[in-house]
Amino acid sequence: MPRHVAIIMDGNGRWAAARGLPRVEGHRRGVEALRRTVRAAGDLGISVLTIFSFSSENWSRPPSEIHDLMGLLRRFVRNDLADLHSRNVRVRIIGEREDLDRDICLLLQEAEDLTRNNDGLVLVIAFNYGARQEIARAARRVAIEVAQGRLSAEAVTPELLARHFHASDIPDPDVIIRTSGEQRLSNFLLWQAAYSELVFVPINWPDFDRTALEGALAEYRRRERRFGGLIAQTAS
Ligand code: FPP
């Protein structure tokens, strides 16, 4: 079983369009798929589940859709936080908080604070997250330390830079699953994905469930992970 599973929940709009429904209905059903997936991930013994809920680039969507997605996040935290807490889930948030409405920042903070001491599944919600932004932010912080003379430029290693990421204590994802058949990372965990297995599933996110998760994990287990080295049999 992978320790860390990350998911790009794609295809809500297409799911809705195929049924003649407004896009928001796809997102609503997407929240239900998210609930099912969190439960299944906990049952399967996965340690960390990271989900891509709102990307830095999603601000370019029509204002009404941004409003709907913000509303769904508010409702998700308000309705589901107690249940997540009772199931020992620890909520973590990655992404830029500065541009978010104050009430959303407070809700995200509340979710992290309430569940801080839980030691079950870690649910990492990527909200207003972009990997390039995360890397640039880390670089800015390191640059300040170098400029202030607290760090030498030679000391800047991949490990040092990664310590400035949003959740630097969390191991890289073993597998990144993307639904809807699209095959790209779309600015999600670019650095952390260096050795992640990528699994693309052809169903839209609102149809994702425990069976689909188990199918994607079975595909992951068929992969041979070498991390740039050789497999055991050919190494000698
Ligand atoms: C991709 O579908 C999905 C998103 C941009 C948002 C994902 C959000 C949810 C599953 C619901 C919100 C969950 C929380 C916790 C707030 P798309 O709209 O890009 O679909 P399309 O590519 O078919 O148009």
Image: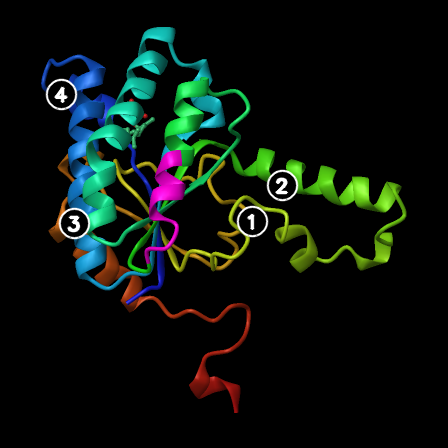
Instruction: Work out whether mark 4 precedes mark 2 in sequence or the reverse, and give the earlier one.
Output: 4
- Asked whether mark 3 lies closer than 8 Å to ligand 1, one says no
Q: Are marks 2 and 1 in contact (CB under 8 Å)?
A: yes
- Amino acid type, callout 2: Ile
Q: Which structural element holds mark 3?
A: helix
The span from disc 4 to disc 3 (Cα, nearest Å) is 20 Å
Residue 136 in picture, x, y percent from top left: 66, 36
The span from disc 3 to disc 1 (Cα, nearest Å) is 26 Å
Q: Which structural element holds mark 1?
A: loop
Instruction: Work out whether mark 3 precedes mark 2 in sequence or the reverse, and give the earlier one.
Output: 2
Q: Which mark is residue 18?
A: 4
- Amino acid type, callout 3: Ala
Which of discs 3 and 2 lies nearer the camera? The answer is 2
Q: Which structural element holds mark 2?
A: helix
In the shown orientation, is residue 131 left or right of residue 196?
right
Specify the principal SS of the magenta part.
helix
The span from disc 1 to disc 4 (Cα, nearest Å) is 34 Å
Is any atom of residue 150 visible in this view?
Answer: yes
Question: What number of labels is visible?
Answer: 4
